[in-house]
């Protein structure tokens, strides 16, 4: 049987070499037929700690690495684009403090 390959979003990166990945999916209600968003949570082995929270990653099924880890990181598809607002404010404040040199 071939190994499953999935794409999901990293929602937890607190522990070393382990990531919590959510794989979104649509499921149809058996009686009413309405589609609802559901998610599958997988614990993934990330040997080099390359992924961070919010990254979109590709994972593959593997033999059990621990009690909960059954998946391994293949690659980071898209990095999370978060902006550090505190650092941005500091650079703006420093730029406003610098006075232009006058030729007078």
Image (cartoon, rainbow, N blue to C red):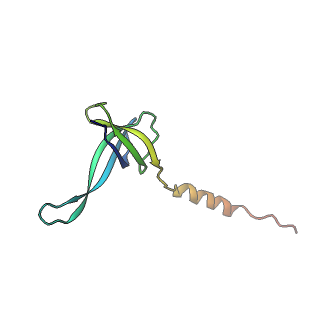
- Residue 95 image offset from top left, x and y in percent: 67, 61
| Residue 23 percent location from the top left of the image | 31, 50
Going by the image, does 98 lie left or right of 71?
Answer: right
Q: Is residue 13 above or below residue 29?
A: above
> Where is 82 relative to 57, above or below?
below
Q: Nearer the viewer, residue 85 or 12?
A: 12
> In what quadrant of the picture does the C terminus appear?
bottom right
Residue in the image at 27% along x and 49% along y: 40
Residue in view at x 56 percent, y 54 percent: 87
Image quadrant of residue 68?
top left
Quadrant into which the N terminus falls: top left
The residue located at (52%, 55%) in the rendering is: 84
The residue at the far left in this view is 31
Rendered position, 33 above or below 86: below
Horizontal relation, residue 50 to residue 40: left or right: right
Q: Position of residue 18 (x, y in %)?
A: 36, 37
Work out whether residue 26 or residue 100 is closer to the camera in this orientation and state it: 26
Whether residue 26 sits left or right of residue 51 in the image: it is left
Query: Number of numbered discs present?
Result: 0
Q: Is residue 37 left or right of residue 53?
A: left
Query: Who's the residue at 53% across and 56% down the image?
Result: 86
Rendered location of residue 100, percent (x, y)? 77, 65
Direction front: furthest residue:
1
């Amino acid at each position: 049987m071939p190994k499953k390959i999935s794409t999901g979003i990293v929602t937890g990166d607190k522990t070393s070499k382990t990531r919590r990945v959510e794989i979104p999916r649509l499921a149809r209600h058996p009686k009413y037929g309405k589609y609802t968003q559901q998610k599958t949570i997988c614990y993934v082995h990330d040997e080099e700690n390359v992924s961070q929270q919010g990254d979109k990653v590709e994972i593959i099924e593997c033999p059990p690495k621990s009690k909960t880890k059954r998946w391994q990181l293949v690659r980071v598809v898209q990095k999370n684009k978060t902006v550090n607002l505190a650092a941005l404010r500091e650079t703006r404040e420093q730029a406003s403090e610098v006075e232009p040199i006058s030729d007078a």
